[in-house]
Image (cartoon, rainbow, N blue to C red):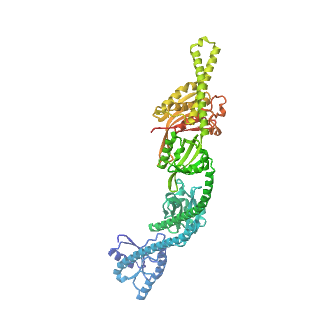
């Protein structure tokens, strides 16, 4: 033996004690012997808190004490401690009686050669008993958990709702698993913590006194329960008194005799929604096998939760299916009536023939429904100049190139008149055959209004801009070449005429541009250009206007490549409108900050693509814009309540918005009343 054996020797004869010691040492036993010879000394050693003896050697008979009494005292306190009588007198009957009462062996003093083997054998028997005891203990622990798993399977079959499942699981862990307490808590998003919903065992309001947080920065989130929920795996504490993670609950837990605990996550769709926590009154209670089996029990509870939810959804779906079938039958009747009475023409086209048309379409084209259904080719209703585009659009939908399509063409009525129509149609399967289903509306009146609008644009361009050009030309000629021949008062009047003419021409141009943009008549001349150059030119052109009002323009940008596909003239106008707007509304002595930059944002797609825009921003130190006015600020002809002293058409910001959208961009406003405004214009850039 390498370890020093600690022996408690009960002997009143010093010579006998010395002989025993010498014999053991001579036989090669490394030992440390503590000698006692009275009842009081022996009891003191037994009851010492640091009692660490490996074996007891005792004389059978002492003057004021006896070995059998010492044996009884020893087995009462340390039932597994080896106890060997070393005595000079012991009959066979007494020896047998002592062995029955718990002695391990006996050795006669005149035969100490047996002492070393007896000690060795006794120690080996203790090791064997200890191993068997540990094995039995572990087997009982595993049998408990297997019993828990078995009872859990029956519980899952019987449980019809979550409450029954949770309460049953906690009860099984206490009754079958022999835990002192068990509880289940679910995530409470309102408190970012774990809220108890079921428990069993000795609680004594422990759960009402504790708080489990899911905030990783809180010390109340690091215990087994909080950690299990946050990290989705089990956590355990095998020594409540010394485990630092249990500090927030230590005193209350020890008061309830909770010396060990373990928590297991309850999972739903891959996410922890709560935890199952158990407590033991033993330190170092949880080992790997126990934890894995309990984790399996928690997984069974999670599976049952998922099954309950799926069954609930199945019942809802089944009920919904029956309701949907009934509603569909009712809806079918209503839709049929709705289509028949619709204000738009409705049709279904198969292989260039109508298989369904409603009365409205027949009336629109001057036919009876039956006549349209008997037409050999629906293309006979299309104006010859538009047949190709109609045929191509139908082909695209049948071939799957495009699902839905909206376009215009000219249709022929039965009497030969032309009617402008707009079609919204899509691909479908009707009676197992690929088909086109669509609606047709008569847009002849709209086309007439558009023509009138176009005529008005031409009239404005010719009848207004022509005379204005002449007025501006002559006034400029007088100012530049005849100023010294004209009275100063008259000259000032001519300058006012020229200024007002320029302003009126600007308003006409804004009106025409906005109208053309809105009616899609103005085609964009898109070219790749550096927006920096445009912003720089706008700043230069309007710097004098700002200076005349006592304002300074801060160019908070540097030269760079801000390349985008743009219409140069339109973007110049939009940027100039933003800057001029800031000049108009910023009090004298204020500043206007002009910026350019690249901004990136995520597209609303599954592949996480990003959009890149050039951003032009104009920030002023003006009066700001109220929340009420911010909603209307980009509307046509809307002018702020603060614009009483500022002349304008109310179209400037509307043009900015329209230009941005024409470039597939956007415009934003950030403002608080009394704190200035920032307008931001975003244009998609080339990256």
Q: Quadrant of the C terminus?
A: top left
Q: In the figure, 374 relative to 25: above or below?
A: above
* Position of 121 relative to 651 (above/below): below
Give percent across and percent down for residue 331.
61, 56
> Of 2 and 230, which appears nearest the observer?
230
Q: Is residue 532 above or below residue 609?
A: above
Image quarter of residue 318: bottom right
Q: Is residue 423 visible?
A: yes
Q: Position of residue 363 (x, y in %)?
A: 61, 46
Query: Could you tell me if residue 63 is visible in this image?
Result: no
Residue 442 horizontal/vertical position (percent): 60, 43
User: Residue 280, how many percent across, how many down?
Assistant: 52, 68
Rendering quarter of residue 675: top right
Q: How many marks?
A: 0
Asked whether 423 or 574 is in front, the reply is 423
Q: Nearer the viewer, residue 519 or 571?
A: 519
- In this rendering, the answer to whether 511 lies above or below 42 is above
Query: Where is the N terminus found, in terms of image quarters?
Result: bottom left
Task: Work out whether residue 223 or residue 511 is closer to the camera in this orientation and state it.
Answer: 511
Image side of residue 608 versus residue 453, left or right: left
Q: What residue is shown at x 66% (from left), y 28% (from top)? A: 645
């Amino acid at each position: 033996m390498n370890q020093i054996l600690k022996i408690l020797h009960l002997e009143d004869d010093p010579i006998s004690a010395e002989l025993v010691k010498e014999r053991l040492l001579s036989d090669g036993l490394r030992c440390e012997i503590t000698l006692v010879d009275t009842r009081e000394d022996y009891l003191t050693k037994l009851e010492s808190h640091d009692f660490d003896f490996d074996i007891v050697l005792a004389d059978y008979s002492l003057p004021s004490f006896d070995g059998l009494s010492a044996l009884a005292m020893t087995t009462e306190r340390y039932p597994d401690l080896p106890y060997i009588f070393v005595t000079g007198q012991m009959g066979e009957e007494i020896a047998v009686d002592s062995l029955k009462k718990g002695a391990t062996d006996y050795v006669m003093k005149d035969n100490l050669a047996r002492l070393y083997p007896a000690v060795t054998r006794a120690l080996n028997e203790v090791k064997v008993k200890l191993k068997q005891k540990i094995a039995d203990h572990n087997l009982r622990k595993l049998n408990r958990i297997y019993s828990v798993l078995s009872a859990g399977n029956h519980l899952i079959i019987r449980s019809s709702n979550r409450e029954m499942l949770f309460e049953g699981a906690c009860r099984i862990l206490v009754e079958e698993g022999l835990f002192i307490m068990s509880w289940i808590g679910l995530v409470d998003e309102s408190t970012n913590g774990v809220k108890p919903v079921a428990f069993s065992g000795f609680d004594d309001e422990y759960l009402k006194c504790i708080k489990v947080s899911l905030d990783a920065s809180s010390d109340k989130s690091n215990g087994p329960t909080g950690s299990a929920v946050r990290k989705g795996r089990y956590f355990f504490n095998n020594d409540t008194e010394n485990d630092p993670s249990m500090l927030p609950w230590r005193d209350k837990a020890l008061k309830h005799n909770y010396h060990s605990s373990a928590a297991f996550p309850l999972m739903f769709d891959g996410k922890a929604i709560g935890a199952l926590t158990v407590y033991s009154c033993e330190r170092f209670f949880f080992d790997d096998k126990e934890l894995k089996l309990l984790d399996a029990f928690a997984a069974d509870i999670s599976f049952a939760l998922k099954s309950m939810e799926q069954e609930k959804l199945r019942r809802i779906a089944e009920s919904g299916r029956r309701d949907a079938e009934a509603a569909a039958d009712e809806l079918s009747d209503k839709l049929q009536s709705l289509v028949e009475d619709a204000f738009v023409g409705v049709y279904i086209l198969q292989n260039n023939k109508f298989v369904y048309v409603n009365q409205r379409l027949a009336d629109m084209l001057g036919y009876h429904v039956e006549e349209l259904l008997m037409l050999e080719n629906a293309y006979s209703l299309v104006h010859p100049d538009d047949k190709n585009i109609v045929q191509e659009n139908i082909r695209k939908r049948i071939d799957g190139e495009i699902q839905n399509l909206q376009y215009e063409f000219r249709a022929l009525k039965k009497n030969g008149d032309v009617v402008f129509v707009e079609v919204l149609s899509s691909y479908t399967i009707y009676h197992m055959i690929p088909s086109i289903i669509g609606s047709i509306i008569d847009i002849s009146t709209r086309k007439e209004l558009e023509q009138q609008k176009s005529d008005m644009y031409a009239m404005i361009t010719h009848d207004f801009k022509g005379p204005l050009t002449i007025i501006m030309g002559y006034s400029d000629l007088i100012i530049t070449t005849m100023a010294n021949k004209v009275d100063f008062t008259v000259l000032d009047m001519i300058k006012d005429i020229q200024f007002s003419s320029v302003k009126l021409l600007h308003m006409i141009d804004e009106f025409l541009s906005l109208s053309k943009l809105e009616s899609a008549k103005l085609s964009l001349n898109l070219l790749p250009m550096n927006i920096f150059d445009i912003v720089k030119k706008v700043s230069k052109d309007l710097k004098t206007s700002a200076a005349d009002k006592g304002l300074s323009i801060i160019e908070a940008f540097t030269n760079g490549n801000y390349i985008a596909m743009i219409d140069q003239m339109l973007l110049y106008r939009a940027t100039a409108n933003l800057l001029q707007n800031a000049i108009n509304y910023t009090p004298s002595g204020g500043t206007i900050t002009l910026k350019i930059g690249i901004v990136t944002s995520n597209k609303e797609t599954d592949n996480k693509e990003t959009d890149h825009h050039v951003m032009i921003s104009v920030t002023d130190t003006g009066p700001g814009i109220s929340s009420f006015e911010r909603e209307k600020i980009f509307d046509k002809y809307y002018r702020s309540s603060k614009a009483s002293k500022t002349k304008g058409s109310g179209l400037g910001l509307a043009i900015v918005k329209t230009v941005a959208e024409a470039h597939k961009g956007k415009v934003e406003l950030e403002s608080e009343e009394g704190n200035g405004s920032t307008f931001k214009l975003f244009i998609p850039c080339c990256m």
